[in-house]
Image (cartoon, coloured by chain):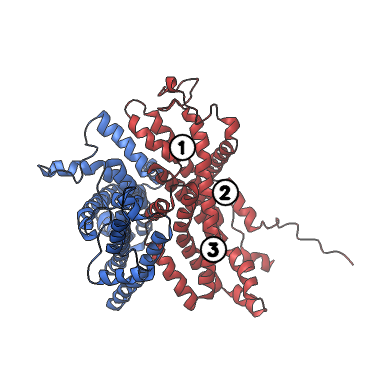
Chain colours: A red, B blue
């Protein structure tokens, strides 16, 4: 009796996840996006140790100094170090982005799954509700909610989260509907699997890529929206550092201290651009049709051999 | 198609009921009393009660809502608590300004995105394409108010080409004087639409240019310009036009930061001050109009699509 050795001539078939990883790592823009994001997250996390100065300490004799060795990005109208404020401001922006992503996930995914999987009346009801929320321009919804509840970072997060839920909900619903009609879901149901099991183990797993890609869009939208609200005076309150708020205050010193508004502008752009690179990279990596270089594993071949 | 449009139009009131109910509840469930903000500290209970009665704030919320809906059905949006003027009048003052700014922005976006999108598609994967892609990436990531500040710095403060403010104030002497203040705001506001439209046109143009009828047109010996413009661009513009309409519906409601920077008396700044002063009727009325504008633009976009592309039946 001999043990049948696995076919050695054929290289081991890579799993979908490994293939996707390889594609992602091969994408230079996406990798640099991840690198910038990680650097920003690290700067935000270690702000107390990284920032050269206290971001709120006022030093009037040093006000509006241009970039120098002592102040790499100059100082603002209170003599506060711009670089330190940028580093501390990253905390606010990234934290808001992250919490809004979690918020959108927590509400958008269940709503979308319910609408797409249950279909019929539930779908109709939930989607009309989502339609109504989509008619509010997100920023105006933010202005309304934050303006009414009071300018506070928690209210900003709630407002931006609410604005993102319908968008994610619609995407999840559409993908769920497409997947639910696939043969393998019908087969699973025929095998006697319950709805909970089908949704959590089979549907959710197959719609992960549009969700992940959308979440990067949610994140960058949240960063810009938070900056906008803070710019309008509805977000982070002074003297706390915030990119949007600092931009708003820099307006008055544009002629004499342009570095004041350029620094937060570039910080926002760098953050949004890198997360967009990551999103584009993920979209390409998770979609086998756009894979370059490596031959796409043919599911039929594995069965035939 | 008429049946479809009718069905969509019938849905509008339903969506508007949800929108208005939501805003009605948010506005009333949150702390802050418009009467106290308006009257300040020195006030008599009588004056307060009279004001409350005049704006129906003394009645139960459900009754307030029903009465408000009946007023709207009669074409009455109510009075602003703060400004002592009908909401409809304020709307007639502010809406045209926001509409003009939205039109200027979308015109800018169209004018820039068509040449960019076509060039990127024609010279795909060349430096032209990469330049366009780079430009759209920057456009996607720059916040409009930050771009506004940069433009002000360069074109108003340094070069003194364009005024910073001037929309909706005074009576401009010439067409030119009226148009100048719109230049910088519409560029700042429209930059995101430039990115969206360029990306869309690039991909739809690439798609169209790979079709068989383009090869046929080339084989017939037509001039390359004719093939690209008449056979290519005309077909690639179908999704583009639809997106223009959708983006336009969106633009009226997202001007608030730009209005803030350029001191424009539009819908966004009216909403901002109404929210700060808890001017309930203004918040409700303006939200409703913005939502309706958005919904109508979307229906219009669907209709346009089916007219432009006979393969699509509504």
Residue B271: image x %, image y %? 31, 53
Depth check, front residue: B79 or B264 = B79
Does residue B278 appear anywhere in the picture?
no
Between the residue at mark 1 and the residue at mark 3, the CA separation in whole angstroms equals: 30 Å
Q: Which residue is mark 2?
A: A24
Q: Secondary structure at mark 3?
A: helix
Between the residue at mark 1 and the residue at mark 2, the CA separation in whole angstroms equals: 25 Å
Does residue A97 appear anywhere in the picture?
yes
Q: Is residue A202 above or below residue A246?
A: below
Q: Secondary structure at mark 2?
A: helix
Residue B19: image x %, image y %? 37, 65
Depth check, front residue: B195 or B230 = B195
Q: Chain of mark 3?
A: A
Q: Earlier in the sequence, mark 2 or mark 3?
A: 2
Residue B29: image x %, image y %? 43, 61
Depth check, front residue: A200 or B312 = A200
Q: Nearer the viewer, mark 2 or mark 3?
A: 3
Classed neighbour count for the residue bearing mark 3: other residues with Cα under 10 Å, few (<14), some (14–19), many (≥20) = many
Q: Which residue is mark 3?
A: A109
- Residue B136: which quarter of the image? top left
Q: Is residue A188 above or below residue A108?
A: below
Q: Secondary structure at mark 1?
A: helix
Classed neighbour count for the residue bearing mark 1: other residues with Cα under 10 Å, few (<14), some (14–19), many (≥20) = some
Q: Are marks 1 and 2 in contact (CB under 8 Å)?
A: no
Q: Quadrant of the C terminus of chain B?
A: bottom left
């Amino acid at each position: 009796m001999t043990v049948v050795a696995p076919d050695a001539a054929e290289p081991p078939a890579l799993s979908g996840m490994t293939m996707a990883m390889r594609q992602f790592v091969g994408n230079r823009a996406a990798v640099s996006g991840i690198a910038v994001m990680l650097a920003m997250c690290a700067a935000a996390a270690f702000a107390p140790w990284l920032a050269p100065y206290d971001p709120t300490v006022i030093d009037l004799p040093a006000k509006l100094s241009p970039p120098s060795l002592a102040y790499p990005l100059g100082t603002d109208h209170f003599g506060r170090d711009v670089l330190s404020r940028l580093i501390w401001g990253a905390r606010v922006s990234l934290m808001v982005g992250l919490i809004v992503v979690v918020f959108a996930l927590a509400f958008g995914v269940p709503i979308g799954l319910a609408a797409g999987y249950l279909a019929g009346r539930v779908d109709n009801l939930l989607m009309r509700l989502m339609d109504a929320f989509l008619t509010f321009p997100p920023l105006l919804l933010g202005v309304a909610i934050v303006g009414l509840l009071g300018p506070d970072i928690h209210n900003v997060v709630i407002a931006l989260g609410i604005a993102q839920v319908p968008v994610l909900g619609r995407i999840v619903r559409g993908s769920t509907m497409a997947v639910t009609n696939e043969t393998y879901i019908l087969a699973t149901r025929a095998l006697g699997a319950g709805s909970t099991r089908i949704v959590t183990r089979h549907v959710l797993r197959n719609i992960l890529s549009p969700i992940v890609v959308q979440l990067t869009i949610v994140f960058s939208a949240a960063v810009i929206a938070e900056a906008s609200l803070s710019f309008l005076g509805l977000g982070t309150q002074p003297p706390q550092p915030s990119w949007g708020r600092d931009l708003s205050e820099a307006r008055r010193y544009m002629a004499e201290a342009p570095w004041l508004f350029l620094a937060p502008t570039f910080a926002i752009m760098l953050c949004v651009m890198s997360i967009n690179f990551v999103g584009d990279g993920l979209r390409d990596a998770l979609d086998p049709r756009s894979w370059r270089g490596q031959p796409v594993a043919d599911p039929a071949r594995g069965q035939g051999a | 198609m008429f049946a479809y449009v009718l069905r969509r139009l019938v849905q509008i009131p339903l969506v508007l009921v949800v929108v208005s109910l939501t805003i009605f509840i948010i506005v009333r469930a949150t702390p802050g009393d418009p009467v106290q903000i308006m009257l300040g500290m020195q006030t008599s209970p009588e004056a307060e009660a009279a004001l409350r009665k005049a704006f129906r704030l003394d009645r139960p919320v459900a009754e307030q809502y029903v009465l408000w809906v009946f007023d709207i059905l009669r074409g009455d949006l109510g009075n602003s608590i703060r400004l002592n003027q009908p909401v409809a009048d304020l709307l007639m003052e502010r809406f045209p300004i926001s509409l003009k700014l939205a039109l200027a922005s979308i015109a800018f976006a169209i004018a820039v995105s068509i040449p960019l999108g076509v060039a990127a598609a024609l010279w795909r994967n060349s430096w032209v394409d990469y330049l366009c892609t780079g430009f759209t990436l920057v456009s996607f990531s720059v916040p409009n108010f930050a771009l506004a500040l940069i433009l002000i710095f360069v074109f108003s403060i340094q070069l003194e080409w364009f005024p910073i403010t001037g929309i909706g104030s005074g009576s401009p002497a010439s067409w030119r004087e009226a148009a100048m203040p719109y230049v910088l705001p519409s560029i700042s506001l429209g930059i995101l639409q430039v990115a969206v439209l360029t990306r869309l046109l690039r991909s739809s143009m690439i798609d169209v240019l790979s079709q068989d009828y383009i090869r046929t047109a080339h084989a017939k010996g037509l001039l390359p310009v004719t093939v690209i413009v008449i056979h290519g661009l005309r077909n690639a513009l179908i999704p583009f036009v639809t997106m223009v309409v959708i983006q336009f519906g969106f633009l009226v409601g997202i001007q608030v930061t730009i209005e803030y920077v350029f001191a424009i008396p539009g819908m966004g700044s009216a909403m901002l001050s109404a929210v700060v002063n808890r001017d309930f009727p203004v918040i409700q009325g303006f939200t409703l109009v913005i939502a309706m504008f958005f919904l109508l633009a979307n229906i219009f976009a669907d209709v346009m699509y089916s007219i432009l592309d006979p393969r699509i039946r509504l």
